[in-house]
Image (cartoon, rainbow, N blue to C red):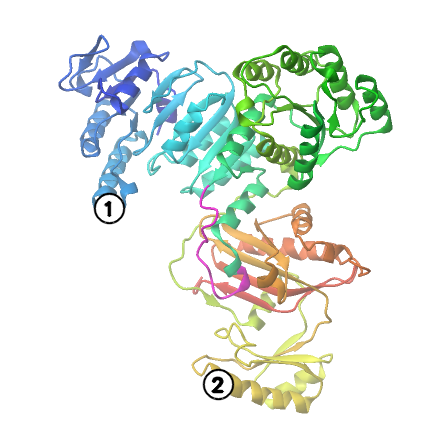
Amino acid sequence: MNLQKLLNPESVAVVGVSDKPGFGYNAADGVLGSSIAQHAYFVHPRRETFKGRKCYRSLSELPEIVDCVILCTPCHTIPSLLEEAGQSGIQAAIIYASGFSEEGTQTGILLEQQVKSIALKYDLAVLGPNCMGIMNNVENINMWGGNVKSPGKISTGIGLVAQSGFVCSELLSAGYLSVSYAISSGNGNICNLEDFLSFLADDANVSVIAIYLEGIKAPGLFLDTLRRAARSQKPVVVLKTGRTRRGAQAAASHTGSMAGASEVFAGIFKKYGVLVADTLEEFICMAQALCVLRGNYPRGTRYGMISLSGGESTLSADLAEELGVNLAELSPKSKENIQKYIPSFASAKNPLDATTALFGDEARTVALLKTFADDPQVDAITVGANVKFSMNPTMKALCSAMATAVQKGIVTKPIFAVPSLENYRHPETRQVLEAAGVPLMSSMGTAFQCLKKIAEFSNYRYEDRNLTVCIPKDHHKDTAAAMSESDSKQELMNCGIPVPAQAIVRSEEELKEAFRKMQLPIALKINSSEILHKTEAGGVKLNVTSVEDALLAVRQIRENVKEAMPQASTDGILLQEMAPAGVEIIIGIINDPQFGPMLLTGLGGIFVELLKDTVLYPAPINKTEAEMILKSLKTSRLLTGYRGSAPCDLEALEDLMVKISEYAALHKDTLKEMDLNPVFVYPQGQGVCAVDALIVKYPGK
């Protein structure tokens, strides 16, 4: 299919034009205002003209084979019109109508299947159904079904894709987004969201990709697109809905029960350096700020902040600490230089209350900005800029100072203008600042959230990640089966993972023989692939120190299991050396049906469910990623030494995490999940030990 014909057509036909408000009018009016107006045709079986332009009765009557047809007619008319388009040699179509699979009815689903079949038959690139269309501001082509006017040509801007026509329309109507392309993907069962993202990732006219995301249909293409965007340093901003919806849960292990759809996406976004917005305001603010910066992103996470009032300065300090925005520690030399530009009663600090002394003084403001920028501890600068309804002389001088400082190269570090309230985003001010590469942010709270995430993005290095896409080829419908603990641990040993010495015994003689070879104390466990929670079934005895106690323990375990789970098959008793206690960590794998194996890491033992301090991250990983994952745990201080405890052997733990992730990637088509809980982590230089293990695989694979 030819996305160029869909997104950048040289000729179009609008079917179902109308004088009444709605798709038929908006689409026809939009193309008339586009650069391709001379090659825009209108089709209606009962109309003679639209706005003085001839209407044709059918697509077959058009004087040329157009690149794209825009269908503004009800759902039941779409199959025949699409068939006619395909027979005519048209290669792309936009379908606005609803009434298809989104309705959830058998009729709607079958209708969309029919439309998809026709599209495949003629290799048609189809947007929709149930969409709002496309706005291409790179070439000034308006194929939008809503009442949104094109702002004219935008050479480099935001590529916006939304799985909601309403949200996409609202963003286009905001008036302060520099959008190169706006694409309302609709149901996305023919050309899907991932197809458009892939196009935007390769388009030089797109500096930022912004996605309103509900779900994914082509996970491999989605991850490959994120990988390409990361490598080309093209920012991707996502607003993901459904963050509280849990994915399918697997009761067999802690790992399975703690891995939900939201956590999977969070891990993916972290790996590929995607900026995640929590609200629409954040989404708009962050995407536009990154667009305006034109690649001049902060080179670190420390901000210098300038305000013109004490109240604003205090609010900045509070928000920075509460939201995790790092304030730069100014050098004595910087403070000395700052004092030259503020009154003697003011204090040179960060955030700075520069007082009203700077009101209207452009030269001093530029000098102050340069002083902040010259401090090596400052990575970016924010300036409180409250322009309400007009560009008064005071604010004009302030905004002019910011623009001048950047345009003349006096300040090369990024500057952000931060108003106190959203309605202070004055259009003329925005134009002056953005022309110079200074983003005019949203209100302080939203702006500071964005500043934190932009700073984190500035630290992202794709070279530090293993960006291998690891999508399972098979989507299993059969039931997975657990391996016994002994078999699971043998699998780990084959990967070089340390586990306690173990043996399977099926008779008293075997028990005595194995017992003599082990260091005491030992643990005895029922060996069964069907009893996953052995303690609850009475199938575990710990701290056994003699053969006599071991024989007694075996009899008790068998009696307990027979009573608790009489139908479960067993295969002897597992004898295992009891490893010395260490810091307990859980390491697990959940193989997501869409995105493949995800590594779960967190505080282990009995605290897994209580604290839920875990991180989910796509496999495979490297040592740098393992270190990053461990540092992101809230309880990471337990690993680095806390209240006199010795630092743990992080290198050995990171090595284990990497090996497990590589095992999962290698077995992505057979592994369902894995659970190592606990893994004992010992003091530095003393290694790790996987004390308990469970591997769940698909049978016969």
Residue 152 percent location from the top left of the image: 43, 13
Q: Is residue 224 in view from this perspective? A: yes
In this picture, which residue range is highlighted in magenta? 241-255
Amino acid identity at mark 1: Thr
Q: Name the residue tied to disc 2.
A: 562
Question: Which mark's residue is nearer the viewer, 2 or 1?
Answer: 1
Query: Residue at horizontal 47%, vertical 22%?
Result: 179
Residue 425 percent location from the top left of the image: 55, 21
Residue 82 percent location from the top left of the image: 23, 29
Residue 663 relative to residue 377: left or right: left
Could you say which quadrant of the image residue 67 lies in? Answer: top left
Amino acid identity at mark 2: Lys
Looking at the picture, tell me which residue is in the foreground, 280 or 294.
280
Q: Are dots 2 and 1 in contact, CB under 8 Å? A: no
Residue 460 percent location from the top left of the image: 64, 36
Q: Is residue 509 in view from this perspective? A: no
Please state the total of marks drawn on the protein image. 2
Query: Residue at horizontal 44%, vertical 83%?
Result: 566
Could you say which quadrant of the image residue 415 lies in? Answer: top right
Q: Residue 236: which disc?
A: none
Q: Name the residue tied to disc 1.
A: 105
Give the structural element (helix, strand or loop) at label 2: helix
What secondary structure predominates along the stretch shown in magenta?
loop
In the rendered image, the vertical position of residue 492 relative to residue 350, given as above or below = below
Q: Counting other residues with Cα less than 10 Å from the Cα at mark 1, is it few (<14), some (14-19), or many (20 or more)? A: few
Going from N to C along the chain, the mark reached first, 2 or 1, is: 1
Give the structural element (helix, strand or loop) at label 1: loop
In the picture, which quadrant includes the N terminus?
top left
Disc 2 and disc 1: Cα gap in Å? Answer: 50 Å
Query: Residue at horizontal 58%, vertical 21%?
Result: 292
Query: Residue at horizontal 30%, vertical 15%?
Result: 29
